[in-house]
Amino acid sequence: MAEEAPSGGERTEAPTAKRRQDFREKGQVAQSKEVHTAALFTFCLALWLFYMPSFFLRMNDLIAHIWRSSGTFEVTPPAIVALSAFILKDVALLLAPLFVLVLIVGFFSSVFQFGWLLTAKPFVPDISKFDPIKGLGRLFSKRSLVEVAKSLAKISLIAWLAYSTVINHIEEALILIDTQPITALVYIGKMAALILAKVCGLLIFLAFLDFLYTRYEMEEKMKMTKQEVKEEHKETEGDPYIKSQIRSIQQEMARKRMMAEVPKADVVITNPTHIAVAVKYDSGEMDAPVVIAKGQELVALKIREIARDHNVPIVENPPVARLLHKIDLGATIPESLFKAVAEILAHVYSLKGIRP
């Protein structure tokens, strides 16, 4: 059932992926007991149909062996122990396929419902579960009443199916008094298979309904309040204010690193006041000029100030400046700007008396 929402909020929000994962790690998954029961009964029926002839043949041999040995059997403690061990061993071998089937069906019916899950958290002791007041509350909770009602309805339907099947074949059962034991056992086996088949059909139907209800119930339980969604977002994505502060610090550090590159530039190309782009070119190391700093407004003003302080030439060329500003820092200029930038660099080199 849905957990009680914290005061001041209702669980109206769909569960997030993190909340689903948290529930899953705690072992709280949608699992219908009726699916386990239906699967077990169905596969037991299938096993019974295939295994029944061999089972009764071996059971008949065991009974015959006990009857043959009864005339010579000495009632002594060692003999009783040996006979008990013999009977237990044979019965265990007869029932072994059933035990193996129960384990396999139990495993795969769980995997079918919620996939592969391995967690030890459900086995960790929870002190709150030992609270007698809460225990009484769980005992008389709506969920407990629903489970009791489901169990009573299921038992009643199964009992009615078994009774109606037996009562319809009561006349056939009465003539078994004068038949051989093996014939009576075979008939009982067939009747058991018939009853089990009807019960399986009923349980599969109930399991389907309960599976849908269990999934709906778990979805309701996992729902979140708006406040829980906000808190989870803060935990996973971080506080927006802190993230903003971190971004500001990172941007400031990146800006300082960029400004430290301005004195190394060969030229600063401006818009003239709104944009400034610092370009560097080393013919021995670079295939083309590289943008090492750029900015607008106040950043552009700072780039120009640093350029003046370090005697870096400033050239006004608005069209080229706008195009260069679109290039990423550290990237070489595109081929379409080679000629324009080359002319600017050539002009700068001529002013410095440097041969490019």
Image (cartoon, rainbow, N blue to C red):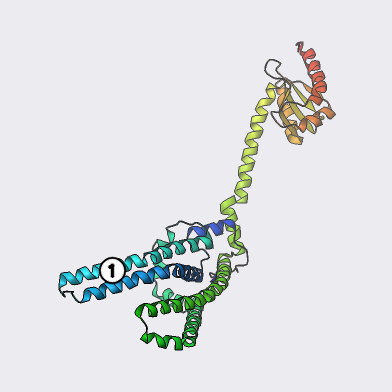
- In the displayed structure, does residue 11 sit left or right of residue 62? right
Q: Where is residue 14? Give x, y as percent.
A: 62, 63
Tell me the amino acid under the disc marked 1: Leu
Q: Where is residue 218? Give x, y as percent.
A: 55, 67
The part of the image, by quadrant, that contains residue 4 is: bottom right
Looking at the image, is 144 positioned above or below residue 283?
A: below
Residue shown at 60% from the left, 55% from the top: 233
- Which quadrant is home to the C terminus? top right
Looking at the image, is 272 positioned above or below residue 88?
A: above
Residue situated in front as seen by the camera: 286 or 110: 110
Residue situated in front as seen by the camera: 209 or 262: 209
- In the displayed structure, does residue 274 sit left or right of residue 175? right
Residue 139 can be seen in this image = no
Q: Which residue is mark 1?
A: 88
Residue shown at 50% from the left, 77% from the top: 199
- In the displayed structure, does residue 349 sit left or right of residue 9? right
Residue shown at 33% from the left, 65% from the top: 93
Residue situated in front as seen by the camera: 180 or 330: 180
Q: Where is residue 225? Give x, y as percent.
A: 60, 65
Q: Where is residue 291? Give x, y as percent.
A: 72, 27
Looking at the image, is 315 positioned above or below residue 116?
A: above
Structural crowding at the residue carrying mark 1, measured as other residues with C-alpha within 10 Å and reported as few (<14), some (14–19) or many (≥20): few
Q: Secondary structure at mark 1?
A: helix
- In the displayed structure, does residue 38 sit left or right of residue 65? right
